[in-house]
Amino acid sequence: MKLKDMSKEELENMSYDDIAYAILTEKKKKMKIIDLFTEVGKYASLPEAVIEEKVGDFFEMLTLDKRFIMLDNGTWDLKERHAQNNMIVDDEEEDASEEVEEDMDEELEEEEDEIFYDEDDDDDRDDDLKDLVVISDDEDEESML
């Protein structure tokens, strides 16, 4: 059933994301978030002020709803119209992130080698602790008075 054929009561019982889904299904085209929420507002009988105030919440709702997808140009559409294999993936970004992860893994391995397997540093550690002074809680409170 089309939105325009629904009664006011039926529309009031629908959530904003369900109305948005119906709008995008009927129009068969992608829409900007404000245009989509304005359409939703018309069907849900929302005043302009409420639409402007709640557009951020609507954006978050669409982001969490797996039926919708935000496209590169800031428009929203139904995910079912955009097959995974048709989506453009920037290979350079993936390669760069993989390189960063590999570099981080190598650094962690080197640090682990230094921390756990370097037996020559035992003597240096003793020298670092020779000037260490331990203060009990009682002595610390007395010095503050």
Image (cartoon, helix red, strand yellow):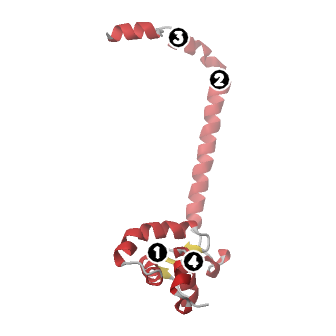
Residue at disc 2, secondary structure: loop
Q: Find residue 111 and report its horizontal and vertical position in percent.
A: 61, 33
Q: Contact (CB < 8 A) between labels 2 and 3?
A: no
Q: Residues within 10 Å of mark 1 (few under 14, many from 20)?
A: few
Which quadrant holds residue 89? Answer: bottom right
Which quadrant holds residue 35? Answer: bottom left
**Numbered badge on residue 18:** 4
Of circles 3 and 1, the one toward us is 1
- The reply to whether residue 16 is in sight is yes
Which residue shows up at 65% across the image and 23% down it?
118
Amino acid marked by disc 3: Asp
Q: Counting residues from the N terminus, which is met first, the one under dot 2 or under dot 4?
A: 4
55 or 5: which is nearer to us? 5
Q: Find residue 120 and report its horizontal and vertical position in percent.
A: 63, 18
Q: CA distance from mark 2 to mark 4?
A: 61 Å
Q: Residues within 10 Å of mark 3 (few under 14, many from 20)?
A: few
Which residue appears farthest toward the left when viewing the image?
A: 145
Q: CA distance from mark 4 to mark 1?
A: 20 Å
Q: Which residue is mark 3?
A: 127
Amino acid marked by disc 2: Asp
Residue at disc 3, secondary structure: helix
110 or 18: which is nearer to us? 18
Which residue shows up at 45% across the image and 76% down it?
33
Q: Which residue is mark 2?
A: 118
Which residue shows up at 66% across the image and 74% down it?
84
Of circles 4 and 3, the one toward us is 4
Q: Counting residues from the N terminus, which is met first, the one under dot 3 or under dot 1?
A: 1
In the image, residue 38 sits, relative to residue 94, either above or below, namely below
